């Protein structure tokens, strides 16, 4: 009897230690799961507050922005013509997105024609001179106008002359607003050291956006244009001013080899063009009664919601480059 007890005693001790170890592991696992769950709840609460203040999922927006930014920088630095291809793809999607949004408001717009014309404008910008670009724009507008007229006659739908003229003006507007303004960035890239000027103005636009969001999120109390864009504040604008001028000086000195005062001018000009572009798109969306152009870019809305500040800024930067370098 004692021998059996002695033989079972080590086995019982091992079982007890194993049971104790399993119990400790379970307690540890439950504690880790609880901490992860609590951390996720706190993260979700913070993210919800940020989303409520900014009007978008800022974390997801940053992740998508980083990916797109990496592709953009790589195309600019390594093979400039790849940037032209990248821009052509993005602009094509943007033209389609804007045309679709306008169609939902009752306007007769042809998305396919808009994309073909937009790709023609932006796809040729890298290879042709300025006078030829004007002819390309005129040809693209003529194409979308004729396409709409033919589509209107083929549809058999009776529309007033005023409505048809409005449709034609809308088709032309898409080409001027999206691919024509975007083409200045492609033309700038094609110039000597133009890739660095292009990268500089894009960084400036991002700096304006970051400065406005950071200051607006932290201190924003006084709406800047409540009827156009309720979430924009004067405090956010002040943050954008500081970031744009500081970024302009640093980029002028260290990236595009210009004196510091050129950086100040660039900072002020890009601040103005980015703000105007942002507010202009907000006015368009408010007129259409929508919050975002689309949901193609989670956390951002649509492509135009990200390009609104870049489009007019591209034209401004090209003008400064022409005046300063040539």
Image (cartoon, grey):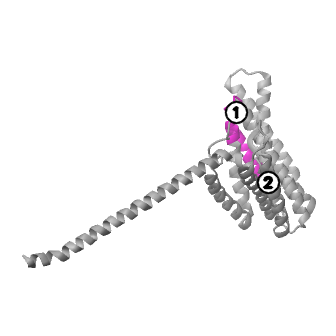
Range drawn in magenta: 97-125
- How busy is the neighbourhood of tag 2: few (under 14 within 10 Å), some, or many (20 plus)? many
Comparing marks 2 and 1, which lies closer to the viewer?
2
Chain-order first, disc 2 or disc 1: 2
In x, y percent, where is residue 20? 30, 68
The verdict on residue 231 being magenta is no
| Dot 2: element | helix
Q: Which type of secondary structure does the marked residue at label 1 adopt?
A: loop
Residue 102, percent across and down?
A: 70, 34
Taking the image as shown, residue 22 lies to the left or right of residue 171, namely left
Would residue 12 be visible to someone looking at this image? yes
Q: Is residue 86 left or right of residue 242?
A: left
Residue 106 part of the magenta segment: yes
Q: Which residue is mark 2?
A: 240
The residue that disc 1 covers is 289
Single out the residue that lies furthest toward the left: 1
In which quadrant will I find the N terminus? Answer: bottom left
């Amino acid at each position: 009897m004692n021998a059996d007890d002695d033989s079972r005693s080590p086995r019982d001790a091992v079982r007890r230690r194993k049971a104790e170890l399993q119990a400790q592991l379970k307690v540890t696992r439950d504690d880790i799961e609880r901490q992860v769950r609590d951390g996720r709840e706190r993260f979700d609460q913070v993210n919800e507050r940020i989303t409520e203040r900014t009007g978008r999922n800022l974390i997801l927006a940053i992740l998508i922005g980083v990916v797109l930014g990496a592709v953009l920088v790589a195309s600019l630095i390594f093979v400039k013509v790849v940037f032209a291809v990248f821009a052509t793809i993005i602009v094509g999607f943007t033209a389609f997105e804007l045309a679709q949004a306008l169609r939902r408001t009752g306007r007769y717009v042809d998305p396919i024609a808009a994309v073909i014309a937009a790709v023609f404008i932006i796809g040729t910008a890298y290879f042709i001179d300025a006078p030829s670009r004007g002819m390309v724009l005129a040809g693209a507008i003529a194409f979308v106008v004729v396409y709409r007229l033919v589509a209107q006659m083929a549809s058999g739908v009776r529309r007033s002359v005023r409505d048809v003229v409005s449709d034609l003006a809308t088709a032309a507007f898409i080409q001027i607003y999206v691919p024509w303004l975007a083409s200045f960035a492609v033309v700038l890239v094609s110039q000597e050291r133009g890739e660095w000027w292009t990268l500089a103005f894009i960084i400036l636009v991002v700096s304006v956006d970051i400065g406005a969001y950071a200051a607006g999120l932290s201190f924003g109390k006084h709406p800047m244009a409540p009827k156009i864009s309720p979430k924009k504040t004067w405090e956010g604008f002040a943050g954008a001013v500081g970031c744009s001028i500081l970024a302009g000086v640093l980029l002028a000195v260290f990236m595009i080899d210009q004196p510091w005062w050129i950086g100040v001018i660039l900072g002020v000009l890009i601040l103005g063009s980015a703000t105007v572009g942002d507010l202009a798109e907000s006015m368009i969306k408010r007129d259409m009664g929508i919050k975002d152009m689309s949901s193609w870019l989670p956390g951002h809305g649509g492509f135009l919601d990200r390009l609104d500040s870049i489009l007019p800024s591209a034209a401004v930067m090209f003008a400064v480059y022409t005046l300063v370098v040539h």
